[in-house]
Image (spheres, rainbow, N blue to C red):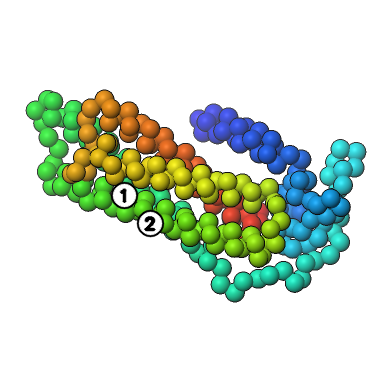
């Protein structure tokens, strides 16, 4: 059952990856997947993970990577803010999504129960406003620290990687801004009063339901974006 779901997703991801990365090869030392586009005009590149200098060439349609040297004097900051700050958005954003999704589901159930003259447990419902407020706070903190993550990541790219245009770092830069922009839109929808009322419950009317659909679509897209950012960041730190 899971294969039926994951195979099309993996196929889509691999197709998108091939279109953006182009032809790829693996670092002979750390086995990090790199793109031919990462090399300079001389066909040389420095592996962003292990720091070896690689010459790549296309031999009968197959990539050939030859190790020439090691970049010993690579800038190594003693305190890297980027990998520390990135854990906060990755850790809190899913809870912001789960919190609002929980409130949405409970509101729908409560609405249909009330139509039949029933109601959910009052002691249970009184926690809904707190859950909604916690979701607001989690999303706000995620956005604040995503800004810190973007700035510190740019600093790392400027100093540690010497502004080399690796395809995987380019993906991180683009996706970081996508996450921030979509996150701001989602936060506006979440706190505007168009979807949830002052007590935290979903407003049961057509326009609010449509807005909720837009909101959760944006949040799910951002969830995929931040998962991709974490995956690429993990590859740049730990490799495969």
Specify the farthest residue to the left: 117
Q: Is residue 224 left or right of residue 188?
A: right
Residue 182 picture quarter: top left
Q: Is residue 198 left or right of residue 29?
A: left
> Residue drawn at (38%, 56%), measured in percent from left and top?
141
Q: What element carries label 2?
A: helix
**Mark in front: 1 vs 2:** 2
Above or below 122: residue 108? above
The C terminus lies in which quarter of the figure? bottom right
* Residue tagged 2: 141
Q: Can residue 215 be seen in this view?
A: yes
> At which x and y percent is residue 233?
58, 55
> At which x and y percent is residue 217?
41, 34
Q: Can residue 65 be seen in this view?
A: no
Q: In this view, does 117 lie to the left or right of 93?
A: left
> At which x and y percent is residue 63?
84, 44
The CA distance from mark 1 to mark 2 is 10 Å
Above or below 134: residue 209? above
* Residue tagged 1: 135
> Residue drawn at (75%, 50%), measured in percent from left and top?
38
> Residue drawn at (48%, 46%), measured in percent from left and top?
179
Assess whether mark 2 and mark 1 are in contact (beta carbons under 8 angstroms): no
Q: Nearer the viewer, residue 1 or 153?
A: 153
Above or below 162: residue 231? above
> At which x and y percent is residue 104?
28, 37
> Residue drawn at (36%, 31%), measured in percent from left and top?
213
């Amino acid at each position: 059952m899971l294969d039926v779901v994951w195979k099309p997703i993996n196929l889509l991801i691999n197709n998108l990856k091939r279109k953006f990365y182009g032809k790829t090869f693996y670092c002979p030392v750390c086995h990090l997947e790199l793109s031919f586009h990462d090399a300079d005009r001389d066909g040389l590149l420095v592996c962003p993970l292990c720091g070896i200098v690689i010459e790549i060439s296309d031999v009968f349609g197959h990539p050939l990577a030859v190790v020439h040297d090691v970049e010993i004097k690579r800038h190594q900051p003693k305190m890297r803010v980027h990998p520390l700050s990135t854990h906060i958005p990755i850790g809190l954003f899913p809870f912001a999504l789960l919190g609002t999704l929980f409130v949405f589901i409970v509101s729908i159930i409560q609405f249909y129960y009330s139509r039949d003259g029933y109601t959910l447990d009052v002691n249970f419902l009184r926690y809904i406003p707190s859950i909604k407020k916690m979701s607001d706070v989690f999303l706000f903190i995620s956005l604040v620290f995503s800004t810190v993550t973007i700035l510190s990541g740019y600093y790392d790219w400027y100093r540690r990687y010497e502004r080399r245009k690796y395809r995987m770092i380019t993906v991180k830069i683009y996706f970081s801004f996508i996450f921030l922009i979509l996150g701001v839109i989602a936060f506006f929808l979440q706190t505007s009063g168009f979807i949830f009322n002052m007590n935290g419950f979903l407003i049961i009317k057509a326009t609010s339901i449509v807005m909720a659909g837009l909101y959760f679509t944006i949040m799910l897209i951002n969830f995929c974006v931040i998962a991709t950012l974490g995956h690429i960041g993990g590859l740049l730190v730990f490799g495969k």
